[in-house]
Amino acid sequence: MHVRIPLIAAVIATLSHVAYAQDIASWAIEMNQSYRIVPDVTYLVADGYEAKLDVIAPRDTSRRLPTLLYIHGGGWRGGVKETHFLDFLPYLEMGFAIVNVEYRMGRVALAPGAVEDCRCALRWVLDHAEEYGIDTGRIVVSGHSAGGHLALTTGMLTASVGLDRRCPAVNPDGAGRVDAYEPEMPVAAMVNWYGITDVADLVEGPNAKIYAVQWMGGLSNWREVARRVSPLEYVRADLPPILTLHGDADEVVPYNHATRLHAALEEAGVPNQLHTIAGGNHGGFNLNENLEAMRVIRAFLEQHGIISGTAPSEN
């Protein structure tokens, strides 16, 4: 049974726990004054499943903020969006709005269901940008593990791949017509935490993992599907900047998924960076490692003009 942690209670608990120093308490109060929380918005209904997302948006929607579109991990078969609120605090401090996405697990839909859903979440963000104060030119997609994979596919795929059809662009002329030209959905950057980049590598062969095998299930064309949802298949010169963070002792998603992606992006001339956590496994990094990772992320976002090096942007 899927049990939701109430979003508002979780945020209040988080802020009250850290508000032991005056500066942090002041920051928490300022956040409460500046942001509103809109939980469990249905962005897609597919296979009888209501896919939901949470939004932490500016109260003043004339402030068009950079926005983090975050996708949780769990091997495409587990995890819930509500467990990642602490991950958002550094982004709120940097002046981001947050969109926190759930999607169909493998028990509801095999591949490529999760990829379709996350592409639809991006479509929802673009369609509701004005309502939530989102700067559509500064959307950053991120996630951990399977969420890292989904962040990459969300940001790298093009409309021609055909995985946006659960949420086709509506023709503004009305009458329920689909837009003759399916618009692309560009993002400003991707921050990939140890995500899968070659799905087939984890379905068959020495690196096969149960979570990947289950996501493919009994699909007779699983090789074709695995290729279709593998970020390595979509490397090209016009991609936005990509930052990958990965431990070189990861036994769940092999480190070479990061190095192969980095090499392919370098060859294509895509702005990218690989930050290696020496001795790091599949997450569970220590305090210093996480602090350094966030320093790298902030510097990366500054380098590519998504945030400034001073106060949060309010354009």
Image (cartoon, rainbow, N blue to C red):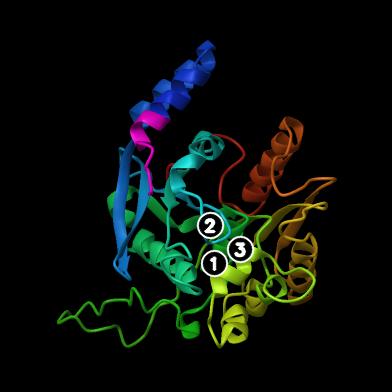
Q: Marks 1 and 2, how far apart in space?
A: 7 Å
Q: Residue furthest left?
A: 175
**At 64% across and 43% down in the image, what residue appears?**
298
Nearest to the observer: residue 4 or residue 69: 4
Residue 163 versus residue 96: which sits nearer the camera? 163
Count of numbered circles on the image: 3
Q: What element carries label 3?
A: helix
Binning the other alpha carbons within 10 Å of mark 1 as few (below 14), some (14 to 19) or many (20 upward) gives many
Contact (Cβ within 8 Å) of mark 3 with mark 2: no
* Disc with the residue nearer the chain's start (1 vs 3): 1
What is the chief secondary structure element of the magenta stretch?
loop
Q: Determine the residue positioned at 76% across, 75% down.
A: 205
Amino acid type, mark 1: Gly
Q: Mark 1 points at which residue?
A: 155
Instruction: Residue 39 in the image: state x and y as whole percent.
Output: 32, 44
Name the residue carrying label 3: 211
The amino acid type of the residue labelled 3 equals Tyr
Asked if the residues shown at circle 1 and circle 2 are in contact, with their CB atoms under 8 angstroms apart, the answer is yes
Q: What stretch is highlighted in magenta?
A: 1-10
Q: In which quarter of the image is residue 172?
A: bottom left
Sort mark 2 into few (<14), some (14-19) or many (20+) by Cα contacts within 10 Å: many
Relative to residue 166, is residue 63 depicted above or below?
above
Query: Mark 1 or mark 2: which comes first in sequence?
Result: 2
Residue type indicated by callout 2: Val
Q: Check disc 2 and report the residue beneath it.
A: 141
Horizontal side, residue 76 vs residue 191: left or right = left
